[in-house]
Amino acid sequence: MSRDASTTQAFADDDYVFRMGWGELEQLQEACDAGPYVVLDRLVSGRWRMGDISNVIRLGLIGGGLEPVKALKLVRAYVQDRPPLENLVLAQLVLGAAVAGSPEEEVGKKSEAPDQSDPKNSQTENSGSEPSTATEPSSASLRKKSAK
């Protein structure tokens, strides 16, 4: 599994996948008039604005695959019609996963990317040139030459 910054959280009436990719982060920046990390800092430090919470959750739902109309309806019913502190932690989790990766994503977990050590995946195999076997001079040998 690759690190895609998604997180699954209980919200509203079900468990939903939240993900904020580059496009959603740009939309958040526009909506909140601040960069994603500034918005995260506001959410964590208690200096958040109302739109910080609702926009993070709405865009996270959309990035997670929910249709925008359904995401907006959920946010209106379960975020904007509720006290803001009920959804503050969710917004922190969603945006935190977007900028730093999700806690569920194990660092070092085997990726679906092809094994680069496999000769079939070599970028030089079909280039027609021989792989280089020359080594660069060590820093010690360079010091000896420059001392002469």
Image (tube, helix red, strand yellow):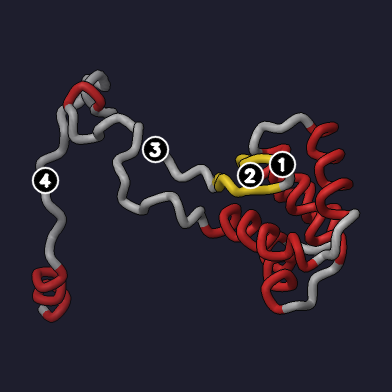
Say whether disc 2 or disc 4 marks the residue closer to the N-terminus: 2
Placement of 62 over or under 124, stated as above or below: below
Nearer the observer: mark 3 or 1; the answer is 1
Residue identifier under label 3? 1
- State the mark number for residue 13: 1
- Of badges 3 and 2, nearer the viewer stands 2
Distance of label 3 from label 2 (alpha carbons): 16 Å
Q: Nearer the viewer, mark 3 or mark 4?
A: 3
Question: Decide: marks 3, 1 in contact (CB < 8 A)?
Answer: no
Q: Are circles 2 and 1 on residues that touch, CB within 8 Å?
A: no
Which of discs 2 and 4 lies nearer the camera? The answer is 2
Q: Circle 3 — which element? A: loop
- In this rendering, position of residue 98 left or right of residue 146: right
- Position in image of residue 83 (x %, y %): 85, 64
The disc placed on residue 18 is 2
Residue sitting at 39 percent across and 38 percent down?
A: 1
Taking the image as shown, residue 141 lies to the left or right of residue 107, namely: left
